[in-house]
């Protein structure tokens, strides 16, 4: 089974990063559906270290605003939803549920802080990418961002649980007037090797 050309266009070839948003809400049911799709993306040992905060209220946006760079302020405040893509450094505590066929897997990470940190960040980042693809598959637009103060976000949203922010994703229905001209991409020979 493959995705047809229209699906590839929707998720990749015609999809664009959004900078402006229509005043159209994204329902809680849609946000839950989005998570229920992205959670099936593969991660190392099914570790699933990503954690998501879907900021969708004025109060939530006001908490997020002090951490935003000036270039990301207006578009984030206007977006119906801003996902804080984070990861749990202690993700391995969930492995008995997520990887039950090897109950020793927890020890892979409790005895190796470097491996735990790398696994959490790498796989949490993957899950953030799954979030963006899943959003596009549901007909939503997205705008990923790294222009913010991670320490401020972590202090405001994660002081109680130790999660760590990675990047932000604005989600909603984009306003085509805010889309920049498409930039170039590297050709296969510039970015790839066949060995």
Image (cartoon, helix red, strand yellow):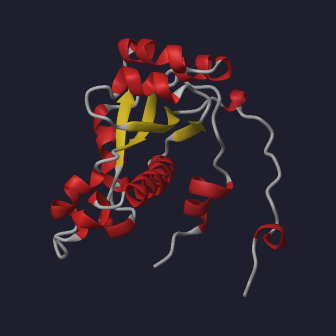
Q: For residue 194, which quarter of the picture?
A: bottom right
Q: Quadrant of the N terminus?
A: bottom left
Viewer-proximal residue, 46 or 141?
A: 46
Query: Relative to the observer, which residue lies in front, 145 or 115?
Result: 115
In percent of width and height, residue 186 lies at 81, 61
The answer to whether 66 is drawn above or below residue 25 in the figure is above
Which residue is painted at 53% across and 33% down in the image? 173
Left or right of residue 167, residue 32 in this image: left
Please determine whether, in this image, residue 15 is positioned above or below residue 150: below
**Residue 18, how many percent across, how many down?**
63, 35
Quadrant location of the C terminus?
bottom right
Toward the front, the furthest residue is: 111
Q: Residue drawn 48% across and 51% down? A: 125
Side of 115 where 14 appears, left or right: right
Q: Residue at x 52, y 19 (%)?
A: 67
Q: How far across and down, in percent of the image, does residue 3 sit? A: 52, 69
Relative height, residue 145 to residue 47 (above, below): above
Q: Residue at x 61, y 16 (%)?
A: 74
Relative placement, left or right, of 19 versus 2 is right
Viewer-closest of 4 and 151: 151
Residue 19, image quadrant = top right
The residue most toward the bottom is 195
Number of on-image labels: 0
């Amino acid at each position: 089974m493959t995705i047809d050309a229209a699906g590839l266009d929707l998720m990749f070839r015609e999809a664009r990063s959004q900078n402006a948003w229509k005043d159209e809400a994204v329902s809680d049911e849609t946000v839950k559906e989005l998570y229920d799709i992205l959670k099936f993306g593969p991660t190392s040992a099914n570790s699933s270290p990503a954690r998501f905060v879907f900021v969708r209220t004025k109060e939530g946006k006001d908490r997020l605003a002090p951490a935003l760079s000036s270039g990301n302020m207006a578009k984030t405040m206007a977006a119906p939803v801003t996902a804080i893509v984070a990861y749990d450094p202690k993700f391995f505590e969930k492995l008995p549920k997520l990887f039950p066929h090897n109950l020793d897997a927890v020890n892979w990470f409790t005895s190796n802080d470097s491996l735990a940190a790398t696994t959490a960040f790498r796989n949490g980042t993957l899950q953030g990418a799954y979030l963006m693809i899943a959003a596009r598959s549901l007909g939503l637009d997205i705008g990923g961002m790294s222009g913010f103060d991670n320490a401020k976000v972590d202090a405001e949203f994660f002081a109680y649980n130790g999660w760590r922010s990675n990047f932000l994703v604005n989600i909603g229905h984009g306003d085509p007037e805010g889309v920049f001209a498409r930039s170039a991409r590297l050709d296969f020979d510039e970015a790839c090797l066949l060995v």
